[in-house]
Structures are given as structure tokens and as C-alpha cells.
């Protein structure tokens, strides 16, 4: 079991943080259709719960049994990213304890997955939970990563007759080294036309508290991305990170764009059959 | 908020709204990206090159005293002088005193970011010594009385029309905006200066310990003229620029050129060590190397952040940065801009005043991906943030907010309650048409975004219902 | 100006060194490095590669059968330049070849000093040629520092046997022949001077030579 390797590693190497965060690929062990514990990011739970529901729908469809540890709140990223590590630490420790029994954890967000896998080792360095956190990080997966690399599934029986462009969310791209996974999944969606938007790897400008502290820069970055999506002629922009999509969605609607945003899970949840057709494809619009 | 932070926000807002500026930068960066991609493809294994450069610079920085002493010894054997300056003032004084003692009236300068850091130009001009920037981009910003916009391409924010107008006004013999003609005009003007200056000041890309020579990576030929014609050559450099062996340049030169401009190697990769040797037809009579500390040894002492000193000043991180692309180089208000500037400046000039630079990033990580010496730049930004909080350089309201955040997130019940309350608040705000107004705590967001979705039920509530829990 | 090494003149030196030594008492982990991975593909045919790279970096590369032919090639190229003195490195080989050039041009020799600002061209030898990048290594022994940068045209008289495959090998050559310590100056020149400081548009001929012409003799006799 690879966790013992990491326990040794940790005691000898105070710089484990930088080694893990270089994007060394995980040793993906093929699992049977595992019992999956759902890691629903705090803002997904409260602001865009449909993303979570859609992910649940898809995971069930491919044969997973699901658990939702009700005690979960947040992974700690907002405080960690803003430098409040003393505040993030207890929240992270709590997270590790809540998920310690889980065989496999799946999360519809690259940034939250990154927090656990790439940053918990440093945040919890010198604490009794560090070894467990490292081991946990090896079995927490972003949703598209789980489907393609662990469950080895690319066709989830989805159907979505629209032109879709992928925005490569930064954490997924650079911290988890994910790029092709969403595209592989989208290529198997019936009637979906996949287009590449220019500068798909450019940051959308959300960046957590960056969006409010440096709102002018954040908005300009989002504005540039919105323009690129429009140039690509996309009807929808999708991503693995709901935070990017919330940001882009707000900007697109602010500029009265015809481009809409939709999370990858929400696309994959669409099957086009009457029995499983769900209400709005796009994130819940504000009640008018 | 520090004055620097206020000014940053003001300038950032102005530049973010300037579409013309953003388009110009985009064009310049696109041009760089195309060249850089071609450049990396010339390597059999670019990643191997990065690993090698990282290793070379790690060796140098982590044995800094040894290699600096070896460098000093060899420079002295060549008849050169080495002065160790603890700070800007000492460095300026040494050079100014030398210039005055030697009767220098004009200095020709090739590019040196350290000279910007220590404000050398002003110190010399205060004594009536004329300083001429000879790097074309530097010369342009000098004529405009601006600071460099970018460490490698100092004038990338200007188009040819602006440069032509500037040359017409300041140089006189220009009547076109054709880049070829503009460069020819600069050549004519600067040539007179090269041949009349008594002192040439250069920076150094590398200090080669085993050879006692400085290495200069250039394209224009101006650094070669600055270091060949005037009778005194002064090198101004940070202490961290040393490398162990001449052989290291076999990898560093092509990597620096590729990362900096996309070239396989720059036009002139030059090594200068000491004044002219007996029997040489020409060259300076005096050679002085000014090693500047100015906070670098303190950064060295911070072992977790030490690798930041491995930077070879290629500018690749600046080009990759979406924040730089949006606000440009002047907004940072510091000598070093972009990711390296945001990481380094708080260390060299203080976290209290400059931590905002480390916060002015979405942490996208593009910088780390492109750094040719594999500095983990965006993670160092995170560390700076952590240190700013630990040193209490952050606003009180922010600290309180995260205390509340922590308390709320340590219980599922509290979390659910706060989430519900926040949604209720958002619905009320929207119902009363107060979004984006002073009453709206989320106005920074709502100013630029259409309203956030406000679901009536959270995921956990719906899961609970579906799965029979309540 | 008194020497700057005494503690009185440079008190900062000891303090900086002390700070560095104290700082380095705490170590940081050494990175793994490339571990034997190849950085550049080996150069199969150096002469061919040299020519290709010269074309790419806009160095004019002229291949001749021998040195006499090189001398004549230079004479022809000189004829097209504006009238005026040329500067030539004072080496026995070039003294010999200069008989061709003296007919049409006044020559300033490097033994008399550095090149005058007004020379139309300089002619020097080289320490080595590098195939990987199409570069010419010159040192102060090749006519001095100004010889390769002051004039608008710089001719390099070289031979095919001076071509080394890549940068690693040129530094080996520098070490073997002790070039670094016999000279106060070296420059690896790749193409003629240029700048992209105006709108990132490449313009040739900034402050250094506008033309770099490398004449490579296949045999040196």
C-alpha cells in the first residue's frame, strides 16, 4: 500500500510540498467501481448544487455506489490561498478526519482537489495528520480525472446537441496535469460539437479572493476570455471548475453575450431521454 | 493599505480598462509565444535543459560565498577590482566616486536592472555626469523619462508612431515611422556617445567563477561597445548572478535566449574579464565589478524561499502572466514586474509595503510552468501571503473575517446555517435592487458580474431529502 | 583611487560574506538535475549544419576551396562596399592574404591599435565556429574587442576544421587552449546585430555590424 512510502518520505523531506506540487502523475490504480465518497465544494453546495447533483447522476450511471459524508464543509482553500494558514489548518484537519474511511473521493472541482492533494501536505506539515493527508490526496480525484483515469470510462451515455468550448481551469491544468480528460469525455457525447477557443489555457481571472480584491483586473481577464469564447462561436463554455464558470457566467451575462456556461458534469448528465431529462442545462439562473 | 498598494490598485483599474493597451500587449506576447515555441522545439529535451539550469543555479546559490570568492580572486588576477556593496547607497557611492575621481563626464550604459534598483542614473546626474542608455528600448524609455516596462523589452508598450514622434522631438533627424529607419537614427545618435564616453557601465547576466569573467547576453551590440570603447568598464550586478563554471554557459546561454526571446542564442554572447591585457589592441584600462547585496543575503537566509535567487532574469514569467498582460509593466511600480517582481520585491523592499503584489495574482501557475530554472513562483506567492498574515501586515477586518470563516466551517450545522443566511441575504439584496450599491457587501463582485445564482436548496439539503435523511 | 579590498575601503565585504555564510548554514534540498537526459540532439554533419544555421540567423557564409580563394572572395565583397579604410587583425595568415586586399584598400593593422570609428570593414580570424547555432567565437586575440563590433561589416576568415559541433564542445576547446585566461574578452557571435525593441519587429543592424560574413576554407593547405 503506497501510503507507507509517503510516511517515510515525509519524515525525511520537509520540502515534500514542492515535490508533490510539480504535477508528478499519480500511480492510478484501476479500481473496481468503487464506493465513491462525494466531496462537494462549499460553494457548489450552497450556490450551484445542480453541479453536484449532475455529478451524482453520472457516477451512478457508470455504476458507482455513492456516499455523501454530511459533516463536510470546506476544504480550507479560501483561507489557505489568502495566507491564513492558521485558520485553514483546523478546517483541513477536519476534512481529513471526515474522509479517512473513504476508499475513493470524487470532487467536481479541480481547485478543491488540488487543495487536498497538492497543498494539504505542506499545510499539515509537522502535524500528526500529515501522513494521512498525503495518503488521502492520492485517492481524491477531480471528476473527469476519476472517470477517465480511474474508472476508465469515456462514454457515459450523454447527449448534448450544442457547440461547446473547453476552458482549461488553471488548477486542473497546471496542478493536476489535466487537459485531455474533459475533451475525451466530451468527444463521446452524442451530437456535441467540440470547438477549441483561442487561449483556452489563459486564466479566467477568478482566483478566489483575487476577484474581489483586484476586481478590475479579474473582470478584465474574464472579459478577455468571454471575447475568446465568442470568437470561437461557442454556444457553451465548459470547465472542470465551477468557480471559473461562475465568474465567466457573470461576465458573459453582464455583457449580454449569447454564450452560456455549463459544468462538465452537467453536460455529461444530459442524456436526451425523456425519463432522465433535467431542467435547465445552464446553472440555475436567478429567479426573475 | 500601503501607498504602493493604493497606487497599484489605481493604476491597475486604469490599465485594465484600456483596451488599446491590452491589445498591444497581447500582440507583443503572441509574437514572443510563437518564437518561444519554435525555440523550445530546437531542444531535444527542453525539460532536461530546465533541470540542468536549475541544478547549475542551485549549486551557485547554495555555495554563494565560495563561488563569489573564487570569482573575486580571478578578477583580481586579471587586474580588475571587485567592490562589495551592502546596499544601493554604497553601490552608487562607489561608482559616483570612481567617475568623479577619473574625470568622467559621460557614461554609456547597457541594460542593467540593478542600476534601476539602486537609482544609479539619478545619482550620477546629480553630479552633472551625463548618463546615456544605449539599449534601444532603455534609450526610448529614458527619452520619455519613464522606467522600463519589461526587463527584457523595456519599450513594448509603445508603437512605432509614438517612437517616431519621440525621436523626431529628441533626436531631430527622423521623418518616418519605419522601424528600420528609426533604428538607424538611434544608431547614428548613440554612436557619437559610444566614442566620447569615458566610462561604460554594464550589467551582467552571469558572473563566471572559474574564469573570473562576466557574461553578457545581448543582440544589439551596444553592450559590446560599452565594454570595448570607453577607458573604464564598470559592471553592476546582484551577488546572486554567479555561476560555477564557464562550461555551464553551454546550457545557460541557449536557455536564456530561448526563454527570453525565442532565439537559439543571442547575437552576442560575450565574456569580459578584466582590463585589456598587454598586447591587446584595445579595450578598457580599468575594470570594476560592483557586487550588490541590497537584501539578497536576507532572502538567502530564508531556505524555503532561497530558490528565488536562482532567477536568470529571462522575463518568461512576465510574458506568461495574465495579470501582466492585463495591467502592463508600469502598474507594478517596482523595478521588477510580473511574477518574479511580485515574489521578489516583498523580500527586497519589505512585506508590509509590498505584500499586495503577492496578492495581485490568481495563482494560475503559468509562471511556474515556463520558468527555465524551475522556480516554483506561484507557490512562493502563497508563501509571501502566509508570511504577510503571520507578520500582521494584513487588514484587521480580513483577519476577523477568516476567524469567522474558520468558526463557521468547523461545524456542518453552522456551515449550513451561514450558507442559508447568505443566500437569504442575497435574495433580499436583489429583491430590494441593492446589488452593486454601497449596501452590498459583495459589490466588488456585483459591479462587474450579472447576479449570482441563488438556489433555494443546498446540495446537502437535496441529498438529505433524496436519501431519506433529514 | 585606493584599492577596494581592504576592510577600511570595503567594510561591507566582510559583512556580506558573513551574512551569506550564516544564511547557508541551513541547507535546501539539491534538485535532481537532468540525470543523463540529452539536451540537444547530436549534430550529424557539422559543416552542413553550420551553413544552415547561418542562413537562419542571417550570417553570410561563403565556402571556398582554400585560403587563397578566401582572400579573393573577400576582395570581391570589399569591392561592393563604400570606399574607406579596412581594419585587419595582424596575424601571419592575414598578412599573407592581405596582399590581395592592399591593392584596393588602405589597411589599418590591429598591431597599431583598435579600429577607427570610420573603417568600412574589419577582417579577423576566429577561435572556433559552432555548428549547432551557426556561431563564430572570437577573442581579444582576434584583432581586439572593437574588431568584431565597430565596423558595419565584419569578415571572418576561417577554415572548416575550426568547426565544432555544439556549445559543449566549444567550451572544451576554450579550456584546452586556455583561451579564457589568455584574453580579457571573448564573444560568441551569431549573426549580425539586431533589435526587436520596436513593436517586436526584427530590425537588422542595431549598434554592431550590419553584416557578418564568414568565409570558410575547406582546406588550409
Image: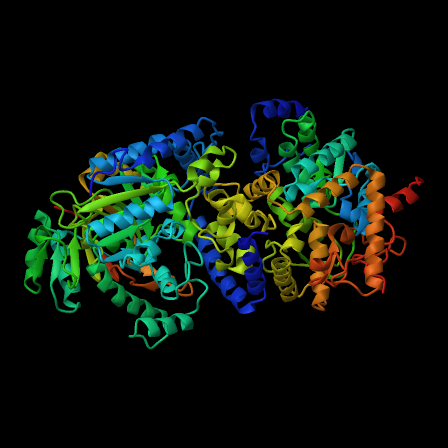
Is residue C178 visible to us here?
no
Residue A139 spot, x, y in % from top left: 71, 33
Look at 28% across and 39% down and name the residue there.
C171
Q: Quadrant of the N terminus of chain A?
A: top right
For residue A95, which quarter of the picture?
top right
Residue C68 spot, x, y in % from top left: 11, 54
For residue B298, which quarter of the picture?
top left
Q: Front-most of B398 and A173? A: B398
**Coloring scheme used:** rainbow
Q: Is residue A178 left or right of residue C191?
A: right
Is residue B175 visible to us here?
yes
Q: Front-most of C24 and B453? A: C24
Q: Front-most of B64 and B440? A: B440
Look at 21% across and 38% down and name the residue there.
C3
For residue B154, which quarter of the picture?
bottom left
Q: Front-most of C16 and B76? A: C16
Q: How many marks?
A: 0
Residue B230 spot, x, y in % from top left: 20, 54
Residue A24 spot, x, y in % from top left: 58, 36
Q: Quadrant of the C terminus of chain A?
A: bottom right
Amino acid at each position: 500500500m503506497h501510503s507507507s512510502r509517503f510516511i517515510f518520505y515525509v519524515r525525511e523531506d520537509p520540502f515534500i510540498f514542492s515535490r508533490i506540487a510539480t504535477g508528478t502523475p499519480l500511480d492510478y490504480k484501476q479500481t473496481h467501481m468503487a464506493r465513491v465518497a462525494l466531496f462537494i465544494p462549499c460553494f457548489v453546495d450552497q450556490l450551484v448544487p445542480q453541479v453536484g447533483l449532475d455529478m451524482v447522476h453520472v457516477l451512478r450511471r457508470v455504476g458507482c455506489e455513492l456516499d455523501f459524508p454530511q459533516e463536510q464543509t470546506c476544504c480550507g482553500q479560501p483561507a489557505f490561498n489568502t495566507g491564513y494558514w492558521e485558520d485553514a489548518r483546523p478546517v483541513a484537519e477536519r476534512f481529513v478526519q471526515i474522509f479517512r474511511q473513504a476508499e475513493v473521493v470524487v470532487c467536481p472541482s479541480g481547485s478543491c482537489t488540488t487543495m487536498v492533494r497538492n497543498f494539504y501536505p505542506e499545510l499539515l506539515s509537522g502535524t500528526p495528520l500529515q501522513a494521512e493527508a498525503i495518503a488521502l490526496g492520492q485517492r481524491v480525484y477531480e471528476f473527469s480525472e476519476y472517470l477517465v483515469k480511474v474508472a476508465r470510462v469515456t462514454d457515459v451515455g450523454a447527449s448534448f446537441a450544442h457547440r461547446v468550448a473547453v476552458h482549461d481551469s488553471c488548477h486542473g491544468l497546471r496542478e493536476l496535469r489535466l487537459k485531455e480528460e474533459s475533451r475525451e469525455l466530451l468527444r463521446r457525447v452524442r451530437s456535441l460539437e467540440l470547438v477549441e477557443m483561442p487561449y483556452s489555457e489563459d486564466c479566467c481571472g477568478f482566483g478566489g479572493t483575487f476577484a474581489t480584491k483586484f476586481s478590475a483586473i479579474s473582470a478584465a481577464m474574464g472579459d478577455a476570455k468571454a471575447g475568446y469564447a465568442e470568437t470561437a462561436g461557442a454556444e457553451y463554455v465548459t470547465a472542470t471548475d465551477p468557480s471559473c464558470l461562475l465568474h465567466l457566467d457573470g461576465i458573459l451575462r453582464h455583457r449580454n453575450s449569447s454564450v452560456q456556461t455549463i459544468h462538465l458534469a452537467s453536460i455529461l448528465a444530459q442524456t436526451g431521454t425523456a425519463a432522465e431529462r433535467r431542467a435547465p442545462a445552464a446553472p440555475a439562473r436567478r429567479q426573475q | 493599505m500601503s501607498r504602493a498598494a493604493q497606487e497599484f490598485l489605481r493604476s491597475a483599474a486604469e490599465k485594465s480598462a484600456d483596451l488599446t493597451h491590452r491589445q498591444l500587449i497581447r500582440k507583443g506576447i503572441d509574437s514572443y509565444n510563437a518564437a518561444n515555441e519554435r525555440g523550445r522545439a530546437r531542444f531535444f529535451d527542453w525539460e532536461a535543459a530546465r533541470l540542468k539550469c536549475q541544478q547549475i543555479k542551485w549549486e551557485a546559490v547554495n555555495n554563494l560565498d565560495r563561488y563569489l570568492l573564487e570569482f573575486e580572486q580571478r578578477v583580481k588576477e586579471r587586474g580588475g577590482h571587485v567592490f562589495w556593496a551592502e546596499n544601493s547607497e554604497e553601490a552608487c557611492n562607489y561608482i559616483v566616486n570612481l567617475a568623479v575621481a577619473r574625470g568622467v563626464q559621460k557614461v554609456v550604459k547597457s541594460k542593467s536592472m540593478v542600476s534601476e534598483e539602486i537609482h544609479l542614473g539619478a545619482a550620477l546626474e546629480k553630479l552633472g555626469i551625463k548618463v546615456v542608455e544605449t539599449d534601444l528600448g532603455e534609450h526610448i524609455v529614458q527619452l520619455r523619462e519613464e522606467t522600463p516596462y519589461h526587463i527584457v523589452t523595456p519599450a513594448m508598450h509603445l508603437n512605432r508612431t509614438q517612437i517616431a514622434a519621440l525621436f523626431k522631438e529628441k533626436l531631430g533627424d527622423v521623418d518616418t515611422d519605419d522601424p528600420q529607419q528609426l533604428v538607424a537614427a538611434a544608431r547614428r545618435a548613440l554612436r557619437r556617445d559610444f566614442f566620447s564616453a569615458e566610462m561604460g557601465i554594464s550589467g551582467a547576466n552571469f558572473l563566471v567563477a572559474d574564469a573570473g569573467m562576466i557574461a553578457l547576453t545581448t543582440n544589439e551590440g551596444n553592450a559590446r561597445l560599452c565594454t570595448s570603447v570607453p577607458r573604464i568598464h564598470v559592471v553592476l550586478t546582484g551577488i546572486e548572478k554567479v555561476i560555477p563554471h564557464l562550461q555551464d554557459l553551454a546550457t545557460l546561454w541557449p536557455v536564456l535566449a530561448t526563454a527570453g526571446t525565442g532565439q537559439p542564442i543571442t547575437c552576442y554572447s560575450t565574456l569580459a574579464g578584466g582590463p585589456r591585457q598587454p598586447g591587446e589592441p584595445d579595450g578598457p584600462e580599468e575594470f570594476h565589478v560592483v557586487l550588490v547585496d541590497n537584501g539578497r543575503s536576507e532572502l538567502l537566509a530564508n531556505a524555503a524561499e532561497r530558490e528565488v535567487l536562482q532567477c536568470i532574469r529571462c522575463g518568461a514569467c512576465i510574458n506568461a502572466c495574465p495579470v501582466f498582460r492585463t495591467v502592463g509593466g508600469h502598474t507594478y511600480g517596482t523595478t521588477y514586474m510580473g511574477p518574479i517582481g511580485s515574489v521578489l520585491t516583498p523580500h527586497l523592499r519589505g512585506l508590509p509595503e509590498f505584500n499586495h503584489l503577492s496578492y495581485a495574482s490568481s495563482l494560475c501557475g503559468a509562471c511556474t510552468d515556463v520558468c527555465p530554472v524551475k522556480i516554483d513562483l506561484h507557490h512562493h506567492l502563497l508563501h509571501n501571503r502566509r508570511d504577510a498574515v503571520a507578520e500582521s501586515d494584513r487588514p484587521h477586518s480580513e483577519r476577523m473575517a477568516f476567524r469567522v470563516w474558520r468558526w463557521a466551517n468547523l461545524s456542518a450545522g453552522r456551515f449550513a446555517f451561514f450558507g442559508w443566511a447568505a443566500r437569504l441575504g442575497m435574495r433580499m439584496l436583489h429583491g430590494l435592487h441593492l446589488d452593486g450599491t454601497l449596501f452590498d457587501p459583495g459589490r466588488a463582485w456585483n459591479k462587474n458580474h450579472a447576479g449570482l445564482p441563488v438556489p433555494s436548496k443546498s446540495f446537502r439539503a437535496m441529498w438529505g431529502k433524496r436519501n431519506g435523511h433529514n | 583611487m585606493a584599492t577596494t579590498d581592504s576592510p577600511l575601503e570595503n567594510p561591507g565585504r566582510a559583512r556580506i560574506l558573513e551574512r551569506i555564510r550564516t544564511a547557508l548554514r541551513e541547507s535546501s534540498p539539491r534538485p535532481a538535475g537532468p540525470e543523463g537526459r540529452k539536451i540537444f540532439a547530436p549534430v550529424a554533419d557539422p559543416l552542413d549544419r553550420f551553413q544552415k544555421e547561418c542562413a537562419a540567423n542571417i550570417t553570410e557564409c561563403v565556402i571556398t576551396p582554400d585560403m587563397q580563394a578566401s582572400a579573393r572572395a573577400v576582395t570581391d565583397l570589399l569591392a561592393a562596399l563604400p570606399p574607406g579604410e579596412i581594419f585587419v587583425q595582424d596575424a601571419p595568415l592575414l598578412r599573407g592574404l592581405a596582399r590581395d586586399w592592399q591593392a584596393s584598400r588602405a589597411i589599418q593593422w590591429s598591431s597599431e591599435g583598435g579600429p577607427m570609428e570610420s573603417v568600412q570593414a574589419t577582417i579577423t580570424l576566429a577561435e572556433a565556429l559552432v555548428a549547432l547555432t551557426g556561431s563564430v567565437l572570437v577573442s581579444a586575440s582576434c584583432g581586439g574587442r572593437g574588431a568584431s563590433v565597430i565596423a558595419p561589416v565584419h569578415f571572418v576568415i576561417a577554415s572548416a576544421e575550426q568547426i565544432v559541433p555544439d556549445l559543449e564542445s566549444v567550451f572544451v576547446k576554450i579550456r584546452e587552449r586556455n583561451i579564457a585566461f589568455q584574453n580579457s574578452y571573448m564573444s560568441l557571435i551569431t549573426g549580425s546585430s539586431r533589435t526587436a525593441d520596436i513593436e517586436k519587429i526584427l530590425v537588422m543592424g542595431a549598434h554592431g555590424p550590419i553584416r557578418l560574413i564568414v568565409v570558410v576554407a575547406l582546406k588550409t593547405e
